[in-house]
């Protein structure tokens, strides 16, 4: 036990004395959260819009009031005719227009249904989609209000029928992806590099000649990275709750439990890579190619898996991060319990056991 | 011989697939002896040494180290040997003291033992001023001496040195060998591989491996007599001339 503590102490010295490792371990997660949280946000606030109000009645005034109250839009002018709107779009300053037809109030009162038109500048398709979604949601809020006030089912039909997609709502959705990436970075990349470094330095051989159990050698090398991973997870959670105002909905214990499975999975991959490579450079490249890259591309974190060709959709199933991403998204953002994610948890655990067995076996063979 | 034999190898063999890296080598090493293990690169000396250290299981043959069978008690062997690899066995980003504490701890020394041995070792190498500095900053020759001292911190019966003086200048090599002599005088057996032939002269006995087999084993003077050579260089070239394996 004393040997074990001794070893872990030494591993911490390695981590703490290497500015590059420190930067990797603590700088990267913070930078990612801040970048994704602020710079790369796809939440769009204070967009300039115009409204063409052909009705000028009670209902249209109320709707415009609702839109003005929202933080997303900056209502510029209220126009009377569509030509003015066209001109406004051409200046490029206006991103979206809402057209309220004549007899808006009248239609609502008597037909209980009315139509509005949302016109968006789709030269930037993502912004257009997002803004359209915001507008649709404001209108449906307004419609619900009318319903409550009048007790009668009113409906306002918007011509733009894009379903509200919560994935587009804002930056906090990046957080689960960042968690997955950071845990992989630490567990796979840092672990494989730190084991291969000992190989390169010749110290691993000395450790293996010593009476210290080879599996304990490996295990003690992993402990600091487990600790660092959990610290990082905590940092990310604190940042996302206090800096990004991300409501944390799920069970904290469940989140840490699921993350631990993923951490062990990453460590096994790191060990596997370290047994297959002989230099730190190769270990780093292999880690990047085999884990980081597929995770970025195929976990669903940056690109939705649903839109991928069948081959890539099938391939994505063997990426552990895909399952972890689903799990952590469900726990963090949707507040779901184990009842809803047991399948993903089982798959992830299975993969973990598989990689752990393969890597330990491989390590043992290398020892012979 | 009536001396205590701490390493016994009998027809020790290691095959990797079709390739026989070590082909039925037999030798004994006595307690306190400095045993040189020579051979060109790829001759099989590292593989042979790895088998004796318990790092690699022999394919066939028998061997015992410090009285323990290499097949049955590799763990017991590990407790009784020290090892220094051709690269440094020290952590460059740890201080001298931390390296001593770490290796002492790995070999199961108590805190008091580590402290006593550490102070003794630092005094012996005259490193008091550098004790709390990172190993990275030490000159190569010092690193090597320190690595050797750390490898014997647990007072093993045998210490295995795998080309310990690679890349070190002659003056430092000589100092290093003085340290080896001091250690051997304390009764610790030294098993050293080298490809510096002048170093072979410093050994009590030398074995020369060619193509996985031991083709000569005697004292340096005995070898020179047998091969009618003026130095170990000539002995080695006479033996290695017929080698079929090229170096790696």
Image (cartoon, coloured by chain):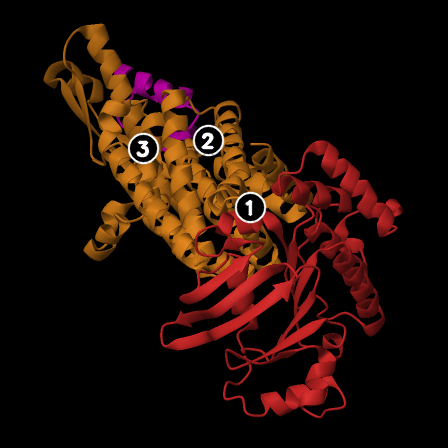
- Mark 2 against mark 3, which lies toward the viewer? 3
Q: Position of residue B229 (x, y in %)?
A: 72, 91
Q: Residues within 10 Å of mark 1 (few under 14, many from 20)?
A: some
From the viewer's perspective, tell me whether residue A8 is left or right of residue A95.
right
Q: Nearer the viewer, residue A107 or A302?
A: A302
Q: Which residue is mark 1?
A: A211
**Residue that sits furthest to the front in the current view:** B2
**Residue that sits furthest to the left in the current view:** A111
Residue A52 among those drawn in magenta: yes
Q: Taking B214 as reference, is A341 above or below it? A: above
Q: Chain of mark 3?
A: A
Q: Position of residue B218 (x, y in %)?
A: 66, 78
Dot 2 or dot 3: first in sequence order is 2
Q: Secondary structure at mark 1?
A: loop
The quarter of the image holding the C terminus of chain B is bottom right
Chain letter for red, please: B
From the viewer's perspective, tell me whether residue A200 is left or right of residue B115.
left
Q: Residue at x 28, y 19 (%)?
A: A141
Q: Chain of mark 1?
A: A
Q: Taking B124 as reference, is B145 above or below it? A: below
Q: Residue at x 38, y 42 (%)?
A: A265
Segment colored magenta: A49-78
Of the chain colours in the picture, the one used for chain A is: orange
Q: Which residue is mark 3?
A: A327
Q: Residues within 10 Å of mark 3 (few under 14, many from 20)?
A: many
């Amino acid at each position: 036990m004393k040997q074990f503590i001794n070893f872990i102490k030494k591993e911490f010295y390695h981590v703490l004395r290497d500015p590059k490792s420190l930067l990797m371990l603590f700088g990267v997660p913070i930078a990612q959260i801040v970048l994704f949280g602020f710079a790369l946000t796809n939440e769009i606030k204070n967009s300039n819009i115009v409204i063409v109000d052909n009705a000028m009645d009670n209902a249209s005034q109320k709707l415009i009031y609702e839109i003005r109250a929202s933080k997303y839009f900056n209502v510029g002018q209220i126009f009377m005719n569509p030509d003015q709107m066209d001109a406004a779009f051409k200046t490029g300053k206006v991103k979206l227009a809402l057209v309220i037809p004549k007899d808006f109030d009248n239609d609502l009162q008597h037909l209980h249904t009315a139509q509005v038109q949302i016109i968006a500048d789709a030269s930037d398709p993502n912004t257009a989609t997002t803004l359209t979604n915001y507008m649709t949601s404001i209108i449906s809020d307004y419609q619900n209000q009318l319903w409550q006030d009048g007790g009668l089912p009113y409906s306002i039909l918007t011509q733009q029928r894009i379903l509200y997609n919560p994935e587009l709502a804002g930056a906090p959705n990046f957080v689960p992806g960042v968690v997955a990436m950071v845990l992989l970075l630490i567990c796979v990349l840092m672990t494989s590099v730190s084991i291969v470094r000992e190989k390169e330095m010749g110290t691993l051989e000395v450790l293996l000649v010593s009476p210290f159990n080879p599996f304990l050698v490996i295990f003690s090398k992993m402990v600091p990275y487990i600790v660092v991973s959990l610290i990082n997870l905590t940092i990310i959670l604190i940042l996302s709750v206090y800096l990004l105002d991300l409501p944390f909905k799920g069970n904290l214990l469940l989140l840490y439990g699921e993350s631990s499975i993923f951490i062990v999975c990453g460590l096994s991959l790191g060990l596997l890579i370290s047994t297959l490579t002989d230099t730190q450079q190769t270990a780093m490249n292999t880690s990047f190619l085999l884990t980081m890259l597929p995770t970025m591309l195929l976990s669903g974190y940056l690109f939705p898996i649903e839109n991928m060709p069948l081959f890539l959709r099938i391939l994505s199933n063997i990426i552990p991060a895909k399952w972890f991403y689903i799990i952590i998204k469900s726990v963090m953002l949707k507040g779901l319990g184990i009842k809803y994610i047991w399948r993903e948890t089982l798959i992830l655990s299975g993969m973990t056991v598989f990689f752990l067995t393969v890597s330990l076996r491989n390590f043992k063979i290398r020892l012979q | 011989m009536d001396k205590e034999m701490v390493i016994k190898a009998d027809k020790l063999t290691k095959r990797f697939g079709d390739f026989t890296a070590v082909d039925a080598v037999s030798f004994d090493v006595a307690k306190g002896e400095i045993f040189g293990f020579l051979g060109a690169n790829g001759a099989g000396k590292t593989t042979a040494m790895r088998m004796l250290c318990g790092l690699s299981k022999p394919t066939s043959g028998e061997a015992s180290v410090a009285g323990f069978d290499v097949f049955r008690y590799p763990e017991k062997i590990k407790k009784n040997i020290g090892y220094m690899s051709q690269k440094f066995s020290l952590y460059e980003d740890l201080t001298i003291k931390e390296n001593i504490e770490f290796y002492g701890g790995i070999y199961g020394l108590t805190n008091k033992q580590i402290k006593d041995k550490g102070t003794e070792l630092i005094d012996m190498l005259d490193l008091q001023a550098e004790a709390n500095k990172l190993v990275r900053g030490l000159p190569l020759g010092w690193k090597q001496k320190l690595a050797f001292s750390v490898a014997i911190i647990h007072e093993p019966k045998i210490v295995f040195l795998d080309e310990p003086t690679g890349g070190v200048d002659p003056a430092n090599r000589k100092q290093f060998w003085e340290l080896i002599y001091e250690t051997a005088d304390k009764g610790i057996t030294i098993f050293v591989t080298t490809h510096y032939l002048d170093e072979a002269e410093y050994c009590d006995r030398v074995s020369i491996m060619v193509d996985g087999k031991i083709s000569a084993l005697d004292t340096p003077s005995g070898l020179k007599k047998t091969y009618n050579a003026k130095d170990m260089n000539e002995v080695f070239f006479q033996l290695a001339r017929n080698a079929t394996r090229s170096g790696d």
